Amino acid sequence: MNVSEAVASRYSTRAFLDRPVSKQTVFSILERARRAPSGGNLQPWFVYVLAGPVLEDFKALVQRRPEPPRVGEGSEYPVYPPKLKEPYRSRRFKCGEDLYASLQIPRDDKPARLEQYAKNLDFFGAPVAMFFALDRIMGPNQWAHLGMFMQTIMLLAREEGLHTCAQEAWARWHKTVAEFLELPGELMLYCGMAIGYADESAPINRWRTDRVPVEEFAQLRGFDNG
């Protein structure tokens, strides 16, 4: 699989097969992903990987918490700006509506929507979970570098025939995650990621988010070939 194929076939997978992923495969992905760029070569990322009984213990801990799944404990950072303007608001709205439409869950069926959202806390059935953190002294530049590292992991996973889902939902459970991982106080949780083999038969895995045309977000200047 070349890079273009990996980019084109990557999507946020929300239903995984009950099929294990080996430690060797995960280690190989991380070993190659460490070549991701970062300003000044700070490499500002920390990764915690859970699988097997350890992952089940973590999920059981989350299930014992009294907080509602969507609310959790509250995020240490705003996942979205508080007043999302257009066109971003409409893009986010359509993404959510398309997701629930794939499951034939109407807008007024809030219990079903909450039930689907709660599947985040099961990593959508994925056999491997990753958590990403960075030092609290880091700023927006280093957050961007962590994002590039995560994207590298997601594309390398595709090369292995795996799929992923980056989950900012876990930012709302930062206290529980920090407790379980024994996260040092100087580290801040960014998000989680589910990794495994996609259940291609699941309706939720059959839809794709829209992308605007290049002309809408890019300006190409100074070229002499039109």
Image (cartoon, rainbow, N blue to C red):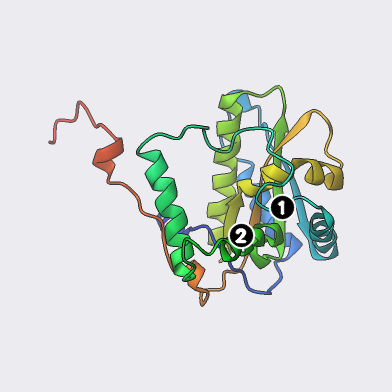
Q: Residue 68: which disc?
A: 1
Residue under label 2: 114
Report the amino acid beneath label 2.
Leu
Q: What percent of the width, then of the height, locates residue 150? A: 59, 45
Q: Is residue 119 shown left or right of residue 182?
A: left
Residue 61 visible in image? yes
Q: Is residue 159 shown left or right of residue 189?
A: left
For the residues bearing labels 1 and 2, Cβ distance under 8 angstroms: yes
Q: Residue at x 63, y 73 (%)?
A: 17
Q: Is residue 199 above or below residue 64?
A: below
Q: What percent of the width, then of the height, locates residue 157? A: 58, 58
Report the amino acid beneath label 1.
Pro
Q: Residues within 10 Å of mark 2 (few under 14, many from 20)?
A: few
Asked which secondary structure carries label 2, the reply is helix
Q: What percent of the width, then of the height, locates residue 140? A: 57, 25
- Snapshot quadrant of residue 26: bottom right
Q: Residues within 10 Å of mark 1 (few under 14, many from 20)?
A: few
In depth, the one of 82 and 49 nearer the eye is: 82
Q: What percent of the width, then of the height, locates residue 186? A: 79, 28
- Snapshot quadrant of residue 2: bottom left
